[in-house]
Image (cartoon, rainbow, N blue to C red):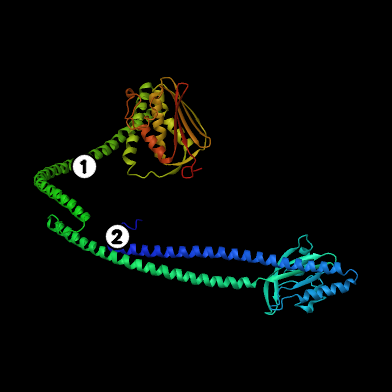
Amino acid sequence: MNPFKSISFVKLKYFMLSLFILFVSLFTALIVFEEYQEFQKEIARFKKEYIKKQKHLIKKETLRALKFIAYKHSKNRDKPLSEVKQEIIDAIEYMRNERDGTGYIFIYTFEGINVADPILKQNKGKNLIDFEDPNGKKVIKELIEVSRKPEGGYVEYVWNKPIANVLAPKISYAKSYEPFGWMVGTGVYLDEIEKFIKNKEQAYKDKMIKYIINIITLSFILLLITITTMRYFSTLIEKSLIKIRDRFNEAANKNIYIYTEDILFEEFKEIAKYTNKMIKIIKDRTRKLQELNKTLEEKVLQKTKKLHIQNLELKRSKELTESLLKAQDKFLKTAIHEINTPLSIILANIDLLKMENIKNQEITNIESGIKIIHNIYNDLAYMLKKDRVEYKKEPVDISTFLKNRIDFFKEVAKGNMLQIEASIEKNLKLSINSIELQRIIDNNLSNAIKYSYPKSTIYIKLYKDEDIIFEIATKSKKIQETKNIFEQFYKEDDAKGGFGLGLALVKEICDKYGFKIELTYKNGYNIFKYILKERDENIFA
């Protein structure tokens, strides 16, 4: 979403002011952050240098004490060793810093027994090898371990600070004097550096406050200058905008040109100039449209009259057409009904003649023709009723049903010099409307009889594979348009007669039930294969 899609000049002014304040704030924060980073680096450098210096001092003091111990040991070899050790201990204890109680030398045996501690004299003679500072560090044990290294070593820990009697961080250097089995060391307290850092932090805070005050003061002065300048120019722009708005409003309402001589800014004059040009174009087009409207009104009036007359004629034609369709529908229904009566009478009389054992080719031919007409009648009756009547499913023994329909068409086949050979698996049942099933079977039998070569055999199969399969094979001319054969009014051979409706009805019924149709040509036979899918809504048993 564009935030500047709809914005006023006043909003823009406040936006720029807010942007300026944000910029100053970010600038101030950046300076403070950089100064803070530099301060942290300075503190880190100071700590590093301070600790380095203190390490050098305590190492120097320890080595000086060791030098003194070695000197006293070498000069007094004629004295008892215990006496020499005591003289060394007394001298070292005397050398401690009396002013603040720091800077003293301490001595422990390698077993951790306190030999000399001028501050905590009560520890003298005690084994402090397992003594731990508040952080759990075994101070004496670590000092002894590092002291026995060739160059000695440093240990950082927390220790009670003399005089002040408070715990403070401390670093000590220790080195062994092997002839006596002593660990000799001295240390320095690091709390002084914390005081120095606090002073530095306070100085940094004062410096930052001064920086921020200076920046805010400068920013405030710049802000005042900016606001004054913006106010002056914004007032000029706002007055010009109001003038332009009023001129545009007047031009829109009165359709007049915009007066530009007293407009201050050249950009606004340029806008007004193009607006005047647009007004001129609009005036010219309005005049032309008015002239065109006069002509169009006359033409529209004439067209309206013509359309009214045409609508009346169309209405009369529609009423006539509807009347003709109703009459046609009534005629077809009546005709089909009237056809059914003589057909039934003829079929009944033929059956009577058969019962009296009167059989000849003429009667067979009559029966064949009547049954073909009867099939066409059934197709026409189904077509008229299928959109008005609901053909409900019912359980049908398709094996028996197919056998009956083959018996019905046997005389028709015989009249056309054809044989029907059927292979029907028993007790195959299907949930389907019997009238629609008859249309599928009768139209396939009728077409088979119509298009088979004379003196050939029509093969019919009904069997159960995964689905129920109905096949009918005829020895006839290969069907060329396999896709069109199921279209209404399409006939592969016009010489054979008929309306071209039978297979279209078959396809429509198969689509309704979800049956699949396969049409192949093999060894001179056209084979129609109907796969009656075993779906729950179709299969009865």
**Do tag 1 and tag 2 residues touch (Cβ < 8 Å)?**
no
Query: x, y percentage for residue 256?
Result: 12, 55
Q: Which x, y percent locates residue 235?
A: 24, 65
- Judged from the image, the secondary structure of the residue bearing numbered disc 1 is helix
Q: Amino acid at mark 2?
A: Ile
* Mark-to-mark CA distance, 1 and 2: 64 Å
At which x and y percent is residue 195? 60, 73
Q: Is residue 135 visible?
A: no
Badge 2 element: loop
**Badge 1: residue crowd in 10 Å (few <14, some 14–19, many ≥20):** few
Dot 1 corresponds to which residue? 322
The residue under label 2 is 7
Q: Is residue 534 above or below residue 191?
A: above
Q: Work out whether residue 199 can be spotted.
A: yes
Q: From what the image shows, is residue 243 above or below residue 88?
A: above
- Please give left or right for residue 533 compared with residue 259 in the image: right
Q: Residue at x 38, y 21 (%)?
A: 361
Across the whole image, how many numbered discs are drawn on residues? 2
**Which picture quadrant has residue 518?**
top left
Label 2 neighbourhood size at 10 Å, few (<14), some (14-19), many (20+)? Answer: few
- Near-viewer residue (156 or 347): 156
